[in-house]
Every structure is written in structure tokens, then in C-alpha cells.
Image (cartoon, coloured by chain):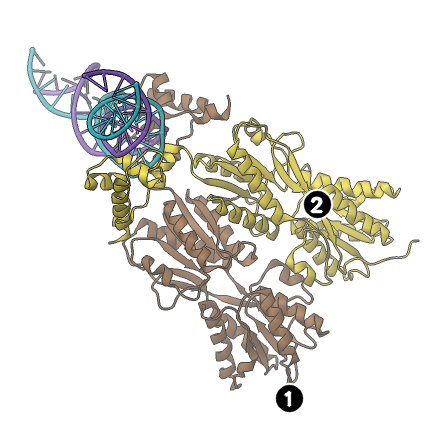
Chain colours: A yellow, B brown, C purple, D cyan
Amino acid sequence: MTIDTISKVTLKHIAETLGISITTVSRVLSGQARKYRISQETESFIRNLANELKFVPSQLARNLRLNRTTTIGLVIPDISNPYFAGIANKVTVEAHRNGYGVILCDSQGNIDMEIESIENLRSRNVEGLILCPVGQSGQHLKDYESNNYSIVLVDRYFAEMSLSHVASDNRNGSKIATNYLIDKGHQRIACLQGLHNTSTNEDRVKGYSEALSGHNIKIDTSLIAGDSFSEQSGYVETKLLLKKPRRCTAVLALSNLIALGALRAISEEGLKIPDDLSIISFDDQPYMAYLSPPMTTVAQENAEMGQIAVKMLFDRIRAPHTNPGGGILLPTHLVHRKSVKEISLI
Amino acid sequence: MTIDTISKVTLKHIAETLGISITTVSRVLSGQARKYRISQETESFIRNLANELKFVPSQLARNLRLNRTTTIGLVIPDISNPYFAGIANKVTVEAHRNGYGVILCDSQGNIDMEIESIENLRSRNVEGLILCPVGQSGQHLKDYESNNYSIVLVDRYFAEMSLSHVASDNRNGSKIATNYLIDKGHQRIACLQGLHNTSTNEDRVKGYSEALSGHNIKIDTSLIAGDSFSEQSGYVETKLLLKKPRRCTAVLALSNLIALGALRAISEEGLKIPDDLSIISFDDQPYMAYLSPPMTTVAQENAEMGQIAVKMLFDRIRAPHTNPGGGILLPTHLVHRKSVKEISLI
DNA sequence: ATTCAATGCGCAAACGATTGTGCTTGCGTT
DNA sequence: AACGCAAGCACAATCGTTTGCGCATTGAAT
């Protein structure tokens, strides 16, 4: 009657009460009655009793026997960040549609936590891993390059490693944004970086540089500042930037948090966007349209990233010993709002 | 060398290479060497080999044998909502600190998905459940009222049921916010509701009403509108409200999304906050300070909610057959920014 | 009367860890 | 010399499924 009692019903119980073997019960209840030529009669006996007793097969036993868990792991640097939350959302929903569960780990932006989380997940026998890596190197993932473990990197990848991944075309996104600023007359454009040596950051900086070079604007390295994707970094670096002589007229913030920090600094300095300073941020979020002023952003298809990551992972789970396959870069696009002002060329 | 090989390392392997019994290996590697008086020598032999082979015990086997999974389930209506993401963050981190994994399910605000998720989680033998319910009734949770299954409700609760829960003191938060508006001279205050018959909504409406009554302001039911916590609802209801004669001077938005919708409507109507209209929103989010204008909000301690929920759940897991215990309401507080204007009394 | 193929089902070994119980030693006591 | 006791370890059952074989029985074909 109680739940405890109910969950104690096992194949053995059914087999014994019916006076038949566990094997037969198992075969019927796992839908293999036809395949093993169990008689209709026996089948219905078994099914009836199973229903009556509300038999629920033990996943624990099944997992051990079959050595699979229908579970994947998801490691995210910070689930409170809406960008990652969007990925996580799609991942869990898609995984469930495929009958898989998702164990979530929050690495808190910490490489050691990331490593620990991965080990933890592996020890829980997840069948595959979706990882948004935080570190500057992928050394701890060396083991996964061999084609017998399924892992898909999301958001960032490691150029020197051959791991499946799905990310945004950050280089192009950054280039488009920078070109747009240049088109609007800006020449001194600052770039608020994120964490160095991450594909995300390097690609965005590269796009920024390429756009400038493409317009024969000399790259002023003093305008490329910062070393973290955090609000704090955006704030500090903007403060410093604004104190410099020959102030820049626009800034490209390489993450949503950096942009918020920049906003704080700019408003503290008493400057107005876009009149005194133009700004474009990465990562379009629902609230971006409601900022003061509405923020022009480089939008990433993060939900799609989650969805594709799951697809890639399942491909690898289903065909484990094929080549890891390469990566996919999803397009980015510019969302025009009000944080950029057209200025006259000098 | 390959992972396949590595992950195949079992107690048996170690035992055989060392010429000792599986039992002893198990006892050493589970830290019970002292208890079972295994010699230092044997212990170090085992440990060394285990390290060398990178032995990782199979959770699957252990789970079956011990009938526990060190895993809990977490059901969230929408992980992309930063409010819930904040809860999820704390839950996963705290669970990990206790050696537990967290299987995440996104119910997508859908009661059927919620029910399905719960069943799915149970069949995966999670030891407990943390649930942010979406429905207007808790009928599907009837089974969990008996004290042999561990569940903790977060954010919402069902007044008619005796399930453990942790939520915000929404009534008081709403009351404080409304009182503040009244103090600033507002008399016609609209209330943009969320989903009816949810504790969150009812409590907030109650607080709103109590504040008005406390100041002898007659409650105008035409000023209480809406039926969903979504941006869409906030937008539509605000549009309608603004079209009415004798316009309200302030609105209380019962969720962050509703507030964003209201913002959109207000700006479409060409009105300025706070000059033409004051607004207070529930749920303080990082970006709230950067809105136009910075938004005065009722902050909830959502991270603490997650943390406390985990604590409560573990209490119940550790002492399963005690009384479910009641609920906890966490304080809310008003974060003063610039979206409320003091107006002269008429 | 054999032979043969279906039919219907059971045996027993996995999967990998945990654990109550019990078996050897060796040593100190008396 | 006989005994007790502790130290140090092993046996084997157990958790609940799944599954490769194999063994009867039956009816039909030769």
C-alpha cells in the first residue's frame, strides 16, 4: 500500500507467484514475448499480475546489467547566466524527448570544479557529456579525444584538439559589429575582452582586428583591454579606458556581463550612451531591449546550440567508434537598437 | 591506455593481480581498512595499484547493492528564467557539496510535463525531489504527503497540503512595495497579476490589498489584472490599463517578466517612467539596475531558497519517516532605485 | 518409424560492488 | 603444551535484470 511496499515488487515475485521462471517474466515485460515465442496465455498472466502489483522494473539493476544509464551529463560554468541557461534549457528538453535524463553540474567558472564535475559524472556512468568549458586549455580533456567516449563541447572549443563542438561564429559576429561601428563613423573603437586564450575571446578579438584592418585602421593595442567575461572586469576596464586621453568613441563588449559593467562605469563617469559613447554587446538577452538605451547586440543562437549539441552527442553515442567529427559554428547576427550613434568623420 | 580499458578496471582486476580477495580490496578502497584491520602493507599495495590503474568504482554496481543513487531530482518551470536559474544554481552546488548529483528537468511551465518529469525521476530512483510547481493544484502530489518519500517544494506551495516547502514571504513583500508607493503619494495603483490560484500570486495580491486597506484606500478590482507571469501578459494588460480613463499612477508588477512586458507597453504608449508612471517589479535581477530607468524591485532571496531547500530535503532523506515538517517563508525586501516618483496628493 | 523443425520455456552466468560471517595464522599466557 | 585472542583476510550471498544456450515437447513430413 505504501510506496515502499510497491517498489519492492520484482521479477522474482511475479515469477514465483505464477510458478514460472524469471526469464520468461523479464522477456514478456520487456516486450520481447514475440521474439522468444512466449505463449499468449503466459504473456497475459504475467501482464495482469504485473499491472496488479504495479511492477516497476528497477533501473538500478537494469543499468548495471546493460551498462547504460540513459543519462547524460551537462557541465555549465554558471547556470544563472541567461546565456548558459538558454543552452541548458534546450539540452534538457531535447534529452528528455530522447528518453535521456540530464545531470547538471555547475562548474562556477572554475577549472578545478569543471574537472571534478567531469569525473563525478563519469563515475555516475553518464553515457555522454556536454561541456561548456571554462579553462584556457583542454589538457584535461586529452583522454576524450580518442573516439571511445562521447563528449561535445559547447560555446567554446580548443583549436588544437579534435573534439566535437558547437559554438557561435564569433569571429564573424565580432567583425560585423565592428564594421557596423566603422560604418557609423567610429575609428577609435575599444574592445573589452574576456578570458584570454579561450576560443570565444580569441575569435572575437580576431574579428574585431580583421574589421579594423579591413578599413585600414591601425590597431591600437591600448584599446584592447580586459581579461575576464565578468561584470567586474567590464567595469574596471571601462573606468580605465575613460580616463585615457583621446578617448574612444565606441566600445565593443565581448560579453553581456562585461557590457553591464561598462554601463555602470559609463554612467558613473556621467557619460551618456550613445551621445558620448557608443556600445555594442555580445549575447542578446530579453532585457537588452529594455536597457538605457536599448542595447545593440551580437545575438548568438544559444538555444540552437543546445539542441545541436544534443544531436551531435546522440550521434556519437549511437556510433561510438567513429571519428569524433569536427565542429559546427552557428551564425551570429547584429540586433540593431539604440546604443550606437552615427558620428561625423573627422 | 584507452578509456575503455581504463573504465574496465574493477575490484576483481585489482584483487587478481594482487592475489588477494575482492573483499579486501573493496574494504580498503572504501576507506574501511582500519575497521576491518587490513594491514598497512596490504593497504598500500591496493592503493598503489588502484591509483596506477585509475580505478573508479562503478556507481551502477554500488547503487544496486546499496539501493541508493546519491542523486536528487530538480524540476524547474523554466531554467532560462534567471529567477529559477538562481535557485537551480544553489541547488546543484549544495547537492554536490553533499556528494549528490542533480538530475534537472524543465517542465516548461506545463503541468503535464511536470507530472511526467516527476515520474521519470522516480523511476530513476532519485532519493528526493525538489520541485518548483507550476500548477494551480497539488493533487498530483497527494502520494508524497505520506512521509515515505522526500520532496520539497520551492517558490510555491499548496496551502491545503502538508508538503515541506520554502518560498518567499510574498505577502509582506507586496505589502511593503505597495505601502512605499502609497507613501510616495500614489492612490491609484494597478496590480499586474500572475497565474491565479498559485500561492505566489495569491499572497502577493493579498499583500497589495492589505496595504491599500491599511491606508483606507478602496480596492478597485479593475486595477487588478492579468493571469500569467509572462512578459506577454504584462504587455497586454498594461496596454489595456493605459487605455482606461482615470489612469493609474503606479503599477506593481508581480514578476520580472510581467515588468518587462509592462515596460514595453509603457514605452509604446510614449509614457516616461517614473514621470508619467511609477513601477515596482518583483524579482531583483542583475540587469534591473541598468534598465531605463533603474527599476525599484522587491528582491527575493532565491539563492537562499535553493540552499535551504537542499538542507530540508537532506533532513528528510536522512530521517525519512518523520513528519514532513512545515514550510519556511524567507523575507523579501525592497530595493530602491529610480522607477518610483513622489507625487503630490490631490 | 524416424527425422526435423517449430514451439515454449528454463538454467545459470553475468554486471560490479558490499558485507555478515567465519577461517586461518601467530603470539602471549598459564 | 594447551588455550585464548586478536590480527588479517576470504567466502559466498546479495541487489534485480538480461540473455546465450539448451532442453523438452509436439506435430508433420518422409
* Residue A336 sits above or below residue A149 on the image: below
**Quick check: A333 left or right of B123?**
right
Element carrying mark 1: loop
For discs 2 and 1, the disc positioned in front in the rendered view: 2
* Residue A261 sits above or below residue B124 on the image: below
Residue A152 or residue B336, whichever sits in front:
A152
Element carrying mark 2: loop
Residue hosting label 1: B346
Callout 2 and callout 1 share a chain: no
Please state the chain letter of the residue tagged with numbered disc 1 in the rendered image: B
Residue hosting label 2: A331
Mark yes or no: residue B296 visible. no
Mark 2 nearby-residue class (10 Å; few <14, some 14–19, many ≥20)? some
Q: Position of residue A109 (x, y in %)?
A: 58, 43
Q: On residue A210, which mark appears?
A: none
Please state the chain letter of the residue tagged with numbered disc 2 in the rendered image: A
Q: Position of residue C4 (x, y in %)?
A: 31, 20
Residue extending furthest bottom?
B346
Q: From the image, which quarter does the N terminus of chain A lie in?
A: bottom left
Residue drawn 62% across the image and 81% down it: B248
Amino acid of disc 2: Pro
Mark yes or no: residue B248 visible. yes
**Quick check: B103 left or right of A2?**
right
Mark 1 nearby-residue class (10 Å; few <14, some 14–19, many ≥20)? few
| CB atoms of marks 2 and 1 within 8 Å | no
Amino acid of disc 1: Ile
**Quick check: B162 left or right of A195?**
left
